[in-house]
Image (cartoon, helix red, strand yellow):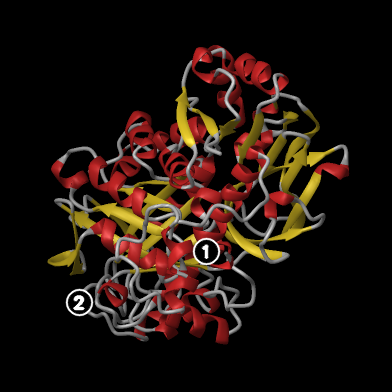
Amino acid sequence: MLLRRVIPCLDVRDGRVVKGTRFLDLVDEGDPAELAARYAREGADEICFLDITAAVEGRATLLGAVERTARQAFVPLTVGGGVRSVSDMRAVLRAGADRVAVNSAAVADPSLVDRCARRFGRQCVVVSIDARRTRGPGAAGDPGRHAADTSAGRGADGDGPAWQVVVQGGRVATGRDAVAWAVEAAERGAGEILLTSIDRDGTRAGYDLALLGAVSRAVSVPVVASGGAGSPADLVAAVLEGGADAVLAASIFHRELHGIAAVKRAMAAAGIPVRLVPEDDWPRRATAR
Amino acid sequence: MSVSVALVDYGAGNLLSIGQALTLLGAEVHPAIRASDVGRPDLVVVPGVGAQGPAMRRLRRAGLAGALERAVAGGTWYLGICLGMQLLFERSEEDDSDGLGWIPGETRRIPSAPRLPHVGWNEVETLVPHPLLDGLPRRVPFYFVHSYAPAPVDRGVVVATTEHGGRFVSAVAAGRLLGVQFHPEKSGPEGLHVLANVLDIVAGEAPGGRPIPIDGPVAAGRGAPDGPRDGVQPAGRRGAAD
């Protein structure tokens, strides 16, 4: 049975891991390669490396930092930020990424998703979507933890999308329906949707479960929950209530509020299949001699 | 004995991790971009990111398909990872493409899968004991990222299977042709254990001789208080320390 993944996320600016709230007020959290190695040791199922200012600054991904990170961690590495073309994607893969996330450039030209999938296979292409509530409880300014979770995908107060796609690191709203974009991206060749709620990002107020549920019901590719993880219970809810195939978190791991092993134990206790830190029930090769 | 490895680079994917892993385990790794780079190594490793159609076209255009065939005919071992395993078979539903065709059978989309691609850690269950998975539990999770898997004509080549909706073949061995659908270079200490097994098999040595040069969750759980913080240690140190 496929195990649910726990993915620490490294938001990288100028070669350093940073973390903000709703994509703003960034605080330095450390070196990406060191953090990746630590998380791999602690049982991370994957590392997500996002160069968060590449798109805004109109430059390519920080390949040197990607490569240093890849050399430290023998777990999968998904890299995003500043990927605008098939050749950008190729460069990121050669720097040690296993999968590549596209975001702003794919919104601007959705055929980028088709082209990357044709060249590298769809399993290699992650479409990262930054979504913001456009109205109703839980819209920007109201990160109330449970308020948003009860609302349906479309509110009664209008026909516009309940969540819109925001690009350029949360700076530019597109008006585009986030759920519809996820569906289109999957049809074009996305092998996974990395779904971030900007309203919840860095708030530790819990994932936007309504957004997550709407997207995970609408697509057949895996969906990664991102934005708002504050406690192990939030990660459990993302899987059981939001239908997430994987859960991504940043600040709770960077600030050691909760460890990866503790989060996984909580998920296992809730009946979610995860890769637990193995017990000493078999002789490890390194130690058997 | 140090094992010489030609790491086949056909223009796609992450070669860094597999190259790094094999080097840490003591292999002498050289990239093979052109046919003349392949030579007669002890082992060719064909890693695995990409779609089968473009991959076969690039292997042929660079003359690598022929060079691999000559090396294997001359006694070189082959390790295929993910797509590199699927290429061993005759053809693939993906892109309706042909493969190298050295093992009878074809690669098909995983049947009855709840979600595709199949991305993440899943248990590999040994069917028939083989040195490839020696020293590991009968069921152990490895990292997968794929939508297709091979269906060998001869079930005797199947070493392990994995469940995702239905069961698919996750490791094969046919003489000197070895293939794994998962990514050992991305599967932590257990993954490096498999790669160490491969190097032992190729070197004709008993398995277990190559210590795993990284800290994993287990080592961390045991305390390993003196372990360096960077997670990667020179080969051999863990074996001595423990």
Chain ID, mark 1 = A
x and y percent of residue A144 in the render? Answer: 29, 84
Quadrant for the N terminus of chain A in the image: bottom right
Kind of residue at disc 2: Gly
Q: Residue at x 56, y 73 (%)?
A: A274
| CA gap, disc 2 and disc 1 | 25 Å
| Other residues around mark 2 within 10 Å, as few (<14) / some (14–19) / many (≥20) | few
Closer to the observer: label 2 or label 1? 1
Residue A250 quadrant: bottom left
Kind of residue at disc 1: Ser
Residue A233 quadrant: bottom left
* Residue receiving disc 1: A216
Residue B74 quadrant: top right
* Residue receiving disc 2: A141
Chain ID, mark 2 = A
Quadrant for the C terminus of chain A in the image: bottom right
